[in-house]
Image: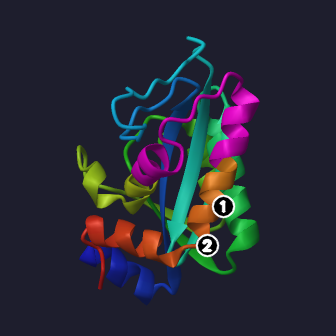
Amino acid sequence: MARDKKKAHRQDRLIVFLDESGLSTRPTRVRTWAPRGQTPLLQETFNWKSLSIIGGLALWRFYFQIHAGSIKGPQVIEFLQHLQRHIPGRLLILWDGASIHRSALVRDYLASTCGRVVVERLPAYAPELNPVEYMWGHLKTHEIGNLVATKAWELSMEATAALRRMRRRPSIMTACYVQAELWP
């Protein structure tokens, strides 16, 4: 990580950690409360609608997009374009070695940015180095834990609202960097 920080500083680039995750209408069960003597119950519809989410954490800003189905090359390119619209200057993207990141479509797009976007891979089998993983964990266990959504649009609406709330709380982003042991 120190090498990537030095490279970003030397080339005047902003480091953006990027990762994808999945969301499902099946609730993630977490602790809850109920009146004494009554077991809390979550009722679900046994639908298995899923959404995918792609996000980037850049210093004190968090960017995200939610998509139906799985994230593929076109969605990665769309998100990179989204980042370029919202973040001025040059970017150093740090992400894992997922096959969608190595696809020919994504490689061609990165080459077309004329060096404005440069990528580096995080070490294999080291998700704990990516602070975005901790954002997903907080989202699923604290913000939308026990959420019972029957439709994908309900899940998307609740997840978007939760991510926007998280974006307004710098303490959450700081905690993600601390968990990933990236705090300077």
Specify the principal SS of the magenta part.
Answer: helix
Dot 2 alpha-carbon crowd within 10 angstroms: few under 14, some 14 to 19, many 20 or more: few
Q: Does 92 sit above or below residue 123?
A: below
150 in magenta: yes
* Left or right of 13 in this view: 96: left
Q: Quadrant of the N terminus?
A: bottom left
Disc 2 marks a residue whose amino acid type is: Arg
Instruction: Name the residue nearer the viewer: 77 or 49.
Output: 49
Do the residues bearing badges 2 and 1 touch, measured as CB atoms within 8 Å? yes
- Which residue, given by chain and number where applicable, does mark 1 sit on? 164
Whole-number angstrom distance, CA of label 2 to CA of label 1? 7 Å
Judging from the image, what secondary structure is the residue with disc 2 in? loop
Boundaries of the magenta span: 136-159
Residue 117, position in %: x, y? 58, 66
Residue 17 drawn at (x, y percent): 46, 62
Query: The C terminus appears in which quarter of the rendering?
Result: bottom left
Q: Is residue 111 visible?
A: no
Circle number at residue 109: none
Q: Amino acid at mark 1?
A: Arg
